[in-house]
Image (cartoon, helix red, strand yellow):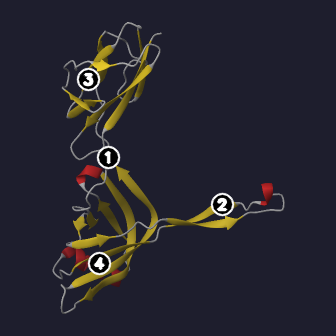
């Protein structure tokens, strides 16, 4: 099943003020220049290049023309002033991701009207400096325990350590977990309750290692994932 997310709900804002009724936001259009550093002794006669200037490109906008909108008006004002502003592109909640960047208005509000269409506008922001892709993770768990059979994990649980191992006897065919943490908690995609022993999860054959992915999912954020590898003796 695809993990694609519908773009509806994406917002472009300047200093926290949304630009109204956008129908398209393109970019950021990141790129870089390169420098040819090929020499007579380049291995195999292949060219060698290195990255030089990182190009930030433009963010192109299209939308419904709303002349009374503060965000659309700010585009024209900033063009006239030559102002460099702080912008964010915030994607739908399911992605928990946003671009943060500075830009000036390269092309201000350009309107278009035709007999068989609505009145629209377009504009371009020229990005300057380093943009940041901001990703918001869910919070950490407060404990992970293998309850049945009671088995220690290594290292000792620490909320900021995300990978663990555990050893069980060859006679052990299943394990249960007790997870402490808020919001939605899952073990290999199966939801479990906070602080309550889970149902049993199957282990692989004797001598195998079974991977368990344990996650905390806060609404509108990316899951915080921990991994526990359980080794079953031969």
Can you tell which of label 2 and label 4 is closer to the viewer? Answer: 2
Can you tell which of label 1 and label 3 is closer to the viewer? Answer: 3
Q: Earlier in the sequence, mark 1 or mark 3?
A: 1
Q: Under tag 1, what secondary structure?
A: loop
Name the residue beneath numbered marker 4: 75
Cα separation between marks 1 and 3: 22 Å
Q: Is residue 178 above or below residue 183?
A: above
Q: Earlier in the sequence, mark 3 or mark 2?
A: 2
Q: Residue at x 19, y 86 (%)?
A: 117
Q: Under tag 4, what secondary structure?
A: helix
Can you tell which of label 4 and label 3 is closer to the viewer? Answer: 3
Q: Is residue 85 above or below residue 230?
A: below
Q: Residue at x 25, y 62 (%)?
A: 10
Name the residue beneath numbered marker 3: 179
Q: Residue at x 36, y 18 (%)?
A: 203
Numbered tag placed on residue 136 in the rendering = 1
């Amino acid at each position: 099943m695809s993990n694609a997310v519908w773009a509806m709900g994406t917002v472009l804002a300047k200093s926290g003020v949304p630009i109204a009724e956008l129908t398209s936001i393109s970019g950021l259009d990141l790129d870089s220049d390169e420098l040819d550093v090929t020499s007579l002794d380049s291995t195999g006669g292949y060219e060698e290049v290195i990255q030089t200037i990182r190009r930030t490109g433009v963010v192109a906008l299209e939308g419904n023309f709303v002349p009374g909108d503060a965000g659309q008006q700010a585009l024209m004002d900033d063009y006239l002033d030559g102002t460099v502003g702080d912008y964010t592109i915030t994607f739908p909640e399911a992605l928990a991701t946003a671009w943060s960047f500075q830009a000036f208005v390269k092309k201000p509000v350009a309107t278009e009207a035709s007999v068989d269409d609505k009145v629209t506008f377009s504009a371009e922001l020229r990005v300057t400096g380093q943009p940041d892709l901001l990703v918001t993770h869910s919070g950490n768990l407060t404990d992970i325990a293998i309850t049945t059979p009671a088995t220690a994990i290594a290292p000792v649980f620490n909320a900021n350590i995300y990978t663990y191992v555990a050893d069980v006897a060859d006679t052990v065919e299943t394990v249960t977990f007790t997870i402490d943490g808020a919001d939605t908690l899952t073990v290999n995609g199966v939801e479990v309750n906070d602080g309550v022993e889970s149902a049993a999860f199957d282990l692989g054959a004797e001598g195998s290692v079974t991977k368990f992915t344990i996650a905390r999912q806060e609404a509108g954020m990316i899951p915080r994932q921990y991994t526990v590898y359980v080794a079953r003796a031969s």
